[in-house]
Amino acid sequence: MGFDQRKDLLGIRDLGRDEIEQILDTAIPMKDILKRNIKKVPVLRGKGVITVFYENSTRTRTSFELAGKYLSADTSNLAVSTSSVQKGETLRDTIKTIEVMGPDILVMRHGMSGAPHYVARNTSMRVINAGDGTNEHPTQALLDMFSIREHKGTLEGLTVTIVGDILHSRVARSNIYGLTKFGCEVRVVGPSTLMPPEIEKLGVKSFCRLEPALAGADVVNVLRLQKERQQAGLFPSLDEYSNLFMIRPEHLRLLADDGIILHPGPMNRGVEISSEIADGPRTLVNEQVTNGVAVRMAVLFLMMGGSRSEIAG
Amino acid sequence: MRLLVKGGRIVDPANGIDETMDLLVVDSAVAEIGRSLPEDGAELLDATGKIVCPGFIDIHTHLREPGFEYKEDIASGSRAAAAGGFTTICAMPNTSPVVDNAAVAIFVREKARQAGVVDVLPIGSVTKKQAGEELSEMGELAEAGCVAFSDDGSPVTRSDVMRHALEYARMFGLPILSHCEDLNLSRDGQMHEGYRSTVFGLRGIPAAAEEAMVARDVIMAQLTSGRVHVCHASTAGALDIIRKAKLQGLKVTCEATPHHLVLTDEAVESYDADTKVNPPLRSEEHVEALRRAVADGLVDCIATDHAPHNLESKDCEYAAASFGISGLETAVAVVMDKLVNTGLLSIGRMVELFTAGPARVIGLSASRGTLTPGVRANITILDPNTVRTVDPAKFYSKGKNSPFKGMELRGWPWAAIVAGTVVCRDGVVAQGLR
Ligand SMILES: [Zn+2]
Ligand SMILES: [Zn+2]
């Protein structure tokens, strides 16, 4: 089944490798559109894309909105976090309200795992999960995979190390599901209190020390640390965290020769990533942002049933 | 008034009976069991091909009244009980107000009497307002007809309060039904902690949250010689602790729910909040251990933990949903189909788990859970051959929150008789009979 046959994009876990490849392949010409002077193609003209973010993330929301605009879709944003929730409106009611406004695609960020699955069951709109609780963040994983493939030429058989709070990270989960489908050796490393139970059953290797986890890695994906986890008693202090798990210049020599560093942003400099690394030549943070737009264009385009010939040239 | 239940297979584990016979009810009591009993003008109930048992007892039902009648009221819960094959249910006290004084206990009994369907025995709270601090007036509650004490919904967090509750309840010979949960370990948890909570990205509730509290309660039972009943035991470790306690001769009993016996945490995959329950649905190894414990006699009874909710509490994001399953109407059929029909439990053991077992836990084995002539004629009749699909829209309960919806099950309760009156026949609950 091609990805263009699906109604919704809820996660990477249930996507086939061929579906992921279809999205990544489609993102290549999309990225070319981003390099043009006039960044606009008419393929989604007359289609409506609405973003509904129950958690603030201006970056991800803007990325989706631009992706839609570059494809000539009409995009708009419903500011739910400030209005409906405070008025006590249920998610179901909000969705029904949006539905009657007629958009084709709903892009949703929600703080509770499974919320987009619930919505998808209750609407005829196509639903894109833009991050749900600690479950999945599929377009982030797709843009990470796109960035890795662009640099390495392939995803096949790479060693990818994900560093940080694996327990609460939807980015980590989506990356694990995606990368393992391509035969990558995925390693996860972080404080043992931030490691989910039975994580190795997902086909990854888990570490609690940075050095062995980084040895020979082709890619290091550094997660953003939520500082509140310390208040929750999951690690003793930010200082100790950065002593043990911050990626610093001396770590670069442990990696494979052309090892690269990813970060989903925004970065906590001096906590999970040192400034030297953040600004270094092997760190792809800015490219990831560009690729994010391209990948989201690909997803929107395929979900509306677009075919490749429409965007060629 | 005479009622002759003819030609059924009578299964009464308390008296070691399992054979096809007739059963005669005179007025509200069981009069006689025997072969080819004469009709003598009795009303006839043809039970050919059916299984005639003592009335089923659920010692763990949330009826929601007073205070939350929009979720369930005593009348709707009583009808659900009858439809599900139960003739006696014990109402948990976490209502508003809490059943922490005689007036509320008497209110529950009076409402149940007016509903006139099944017997409702109130459970009093362990602590005032279930706040976990001061003991309720247990003597007054016992006098008002409470058959046990429980703060279910919450654990009795303080060990000193649990200690004194057990010591004090001993004076009335009543058990404490304990909801075993270490709230610090389970905080914000949505499902069983393990592989699947990792995959689904939901906050986990570790088995240890239950086990740590079961261990504490067993130690308290030892300290006080009190009677502790572990509600909804769901983990292998909890069962191990209970097994050891029983071997030591402590007065510790436990119950299992149909959903913990039949479903695993895999059911959470859909993020359908009807699978959200506390304790959570566990992984296979725990479910296996619970099934073994039910089959080998460790588990004393099956209880529904019937927890009806209104649609709004369940039709939402998983994390926002309430915990609980509307269980009265499916419990017996689920156990019949998934445990008896699969050969894990004999009919006799199953009937024991729903009759003599629960009666023993609440100290009423002389008068309930048996068909001994002279006892109140509470009778449940099962039809092992009825095949039906679970359709919550047809529930008598106001709670439509069932993880079993759409499941086809073979073996359903067919009739329920309470004090000699047929309150449910062919799955249909009679109105205004008593
Ligand atoms: Zn409970
Ligand atoms: Zn309960």
Image: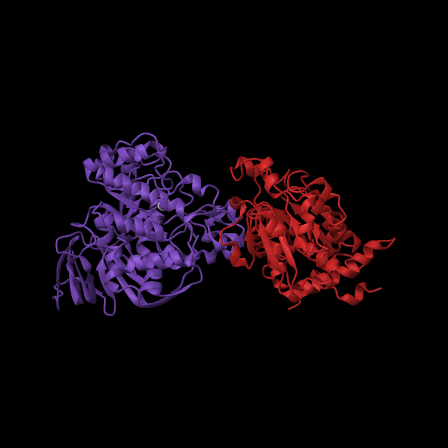
Residue at 12%, 64% (x, y): give it: B40
Q: In the rendered image, which quarter is residue A19 located in?
A: bottom right
Q: Evaluate whether residue B72 shows in this view.
A: no
Q: Is residue A297 left or right of B404 when viewed as pictured?
A: right
Q: Position of residue B119 (x, y in %)?
A: 25, 48
Choose between B99 and B237: the one closer to the eye: B237
Q: Evaluate whether residue B175 shows in this view.
A: yes
Residue B106 lies, with reference to residue A142, above or below; the image says above
Chain B representation colour: purple
Residue at 38%, 51% (x, y): give it: B397
Image quarter of the C terminus of chain A: bottom right
Q: Say how many tags the image has.
A: 0
Q: Position of residue B143 (x, y in %)?
A: 21, 36
Choose between B28 and B249: the one closer to the eye: B249
Colour logic? by chain
Residue at 33%, 63% (x, y): give it: B339
Choose between B5 and B335: the one closer to the eye: B335
Residue A212 lies, with reference to residue A244, above or below; the image says below
Q: In the rendered image, which quarter is residue B338 located in?
A: bottom left
Residue at 66%, 60% (x, y): give it: A158
Q: Position of residue A296 (x, y in %)?
A: 72, 55
Q: Position of residue A2 (x, y in %)?
A: 66, 67
Q: Is residue B373 left or right of A156 when viewed as pictured?
A: left
Q: Which chain is red?
A: A
Give the residue furthest to the top.
B134
Image quarter of the N terminus of chain A: bottom right
